[in-house]
């Protein structure tokens, strides 16, 4: 029997069904609230609102759990394979060997950009923000793939998804090369996903960039850890845009725009700038912590805090360990890692952060690892986007396949003036 909650309004009682997820999360179903009571729900930052039912990713902020299709994130860390994780997220189970080979093959077959898209890079200023280029170019891909505007079956979804996941790294690498005024390096079909991205970023004509297994693994790990995080800001954006019937390319381009924000994916850049400022001597770790606590100062301790996690973000834990491993393997140090450790130590001993459950999030250590790989700071959020793309696609698909999907259209509480009379210009 469905559990019900009773809402008493004046002298009337209303029953609201309680829904339960597979991990026991309970939600009040208010979809008929207005119809039954004339009231709407008010939840300005959607902190208590489930936008959908989803089978893709489970997070438990109190226990610090993150699972993709049921598999704990920690289990991807040993032999990280981003392409396999992408398939899992999109299609709902681990791929068989031939399924993964087909998926990878489609990506290799679609790794080049149409010349029209490539020329687009020549017509932007060299210092164009790579996230602006990324969202514009993903949107522009729709001009060249109109056959995927309507995705009737899994086959065509896979075709469209592999084009996006493959081309996004070509677009990212080309925007980096363009910003340096360097020739574009075309993808090499012999290389695996992450190695190919590094090749396009760092090879130069006639000199192939050497990619160690350790660095390739580190990049796979970074992409996997960013691959999905249920209804975060950019993924909700993709769902909202998709709910209007917008195609996959347009929906993912909107996701990139949301991710760009400094409270979301842009935080990894802010973290790096904060650590660099401390390293240059412009700010001490103690001053940084003081500024973050000062309510008259808009500064926040970047890479700390999370809407869902009330404990250490499990992704940050894995990334911190990966940083230590990669630097040990490289036999070199990065002073920024020491500064990050120091900031973490100060914050976790400070009642301000402890009382508010503010712990390192995914962005706190990811930048240090990206830097160790050689990725410049202005490409950090782009790397987040490359990683997040399978998650956006998985959510877009789940919503698209759900026959009960309707356009998402929230309500508001109007607080403007009551009816006024228009005043002609000469009488104002
Ligand atoms: N530094 C200082 N104070 C903080 C921080 C921080 N990083 N994060 C939260 N707080 C304080 C905040 O001022 C508030 O204090 P009070 O209760 O006194 O008003 C309290 O903690 C609750 O914060 P909130 O802003 O209401 O929490 P939220 O759930 O709306 O925001 C957040 C979550 C991630 C936007 C926020 O913690 C933040 O701005 N963090 C820094 C930016 C960041 O690292 N973003 C990346 C998030 S993880 C990856 C991603 O989503 O892309």
Image (cartoon, helix red, strand yellow):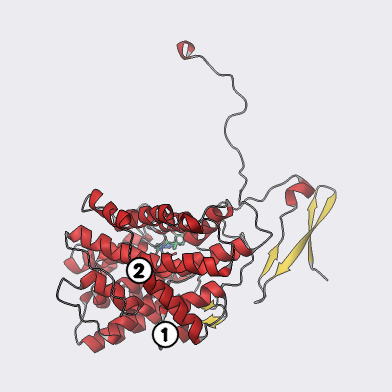
Q: Residue at x 62, y 51 (%)?
A: 407
Q: Position of residue 90 (x, y in %)?
A: 53, 72
Alpha carbons under labels 1 and 2: distance apart? 26 Å
Choose the circle earlier in sequence order: 1 or 2. 1
- Camera-side residue: 219 or 175? 175
Q: What residue is pinned by disc 2?
A: 111
* Image quadrant occupied by the N terminus: bottom right
Report whether 378 appears left or right of 80.
left
Image-based side of 118 in relation to 13, left or right: left
Q: Is residue 397 left or right of residue 113?
A: right
> Residue sitting at 37 percent across and 74 percent down?
108
Q: Quadrant of ligand 1?
A: bottom left
* Residue 287 visible to an observer of this rendering: no
User: Is residue 417 shown above or below 377?
Assistant: above
Q: Nearer the viewer, mark 1 or mark 2?
A: 2
Which residue is tagged 1? 77
**SS label for mark 1:** loop
Q: Position of residue 32 (x, y in %)?
A: 75, 53
Number of marks present in the image shown: 2
Which numbered disc covers residue 89? none
Dot 2 alpha-carbon crowd within 10 angstroms: few under 14, some 14 to 19, many 20 or more = many
């Amino acid at each position: 029997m469905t559990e019900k909650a009773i809402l008493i309004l004046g002298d009337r009682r209303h029953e609201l069904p309680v829904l339960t997820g597979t991990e026991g999360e309970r939600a009040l179903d208010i979809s008929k609230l207005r119809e039954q009571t004339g009231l709407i729900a008010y939840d300005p930052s959607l902190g208590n609102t489930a936008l959908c039912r989803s089978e893709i990713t489970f997070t438990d902020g109190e226990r610090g759990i993150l699972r993709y299709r049921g598999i704990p994130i920690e289990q991807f860390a040993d032999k990280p394979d981003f392409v396999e994780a992408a398939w899992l997220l999109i299609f709902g189970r681990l791929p068989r060997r031939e399924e993964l080979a087909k998926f990878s093959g489609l990506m290799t077959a679609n790794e080049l950009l149409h010349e029209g898209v490539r020329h687009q890079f020549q017509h932007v200023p060299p210092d164009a923000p790579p996230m602006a280029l990324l969202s514009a170019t993903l949107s522009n891909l729709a001009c060249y793939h109109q056959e995927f505007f309507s995705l009737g079956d899994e086959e065509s979804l896979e075709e469209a998804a592999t084009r996006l996941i493959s081309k996004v790294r070509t677009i990212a690498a080309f925007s980096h090369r363009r910003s340096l005024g360097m020739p574009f390096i075309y993808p090499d079909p012999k290389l695996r996903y992450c190695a190919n991205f590094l090749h396009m970023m760092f090879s130069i004509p006639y000199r192939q960039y050497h990619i160690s297994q350790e660095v390739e693994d580190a990049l796979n790990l970074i992409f996997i850890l960013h691959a999905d995080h249920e209804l975060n800001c950019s993924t909700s954006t993709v769902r909202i845009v998709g709910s209007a019937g917008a195609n996959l390319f347009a929906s993912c381009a909107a996701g990139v725009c949301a991710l760009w924000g400094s409270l979301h994916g842009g935080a990894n850049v802010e973290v790096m700038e904060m650590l660099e400022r401390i390293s240059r001597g412009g700010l001490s770790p103690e001053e940084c912590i003081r500024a973050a606590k000062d309510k008259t100062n808009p500064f926040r301790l970047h890479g700390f805090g999370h809407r869902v996690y009330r404990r250490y973000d499990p992704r940050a834990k894995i990334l911190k360990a990966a940083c230590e491993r990669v630097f040990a393997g490289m036999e070199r140090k990065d002073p920024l890692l020491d500064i990050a450790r120091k900031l973490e130590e100060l914050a976790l001993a400070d009642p301000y952060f402890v009382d508010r459950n503010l712990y390192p999030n995914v962005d706190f250590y990811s930048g240090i690892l990206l830097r160790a790989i050689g990725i410049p700071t202005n490409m950090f959020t782009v790397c987040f986007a490359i990683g997040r793309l399978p998650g956006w696609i998985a959510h877009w698909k789940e919503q698209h396949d759900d026959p009960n999907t309707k356009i998402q259209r929230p309500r508001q509480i109007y607080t403007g003036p009551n009816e006024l009379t228009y005043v002609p210009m000469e009488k104002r």
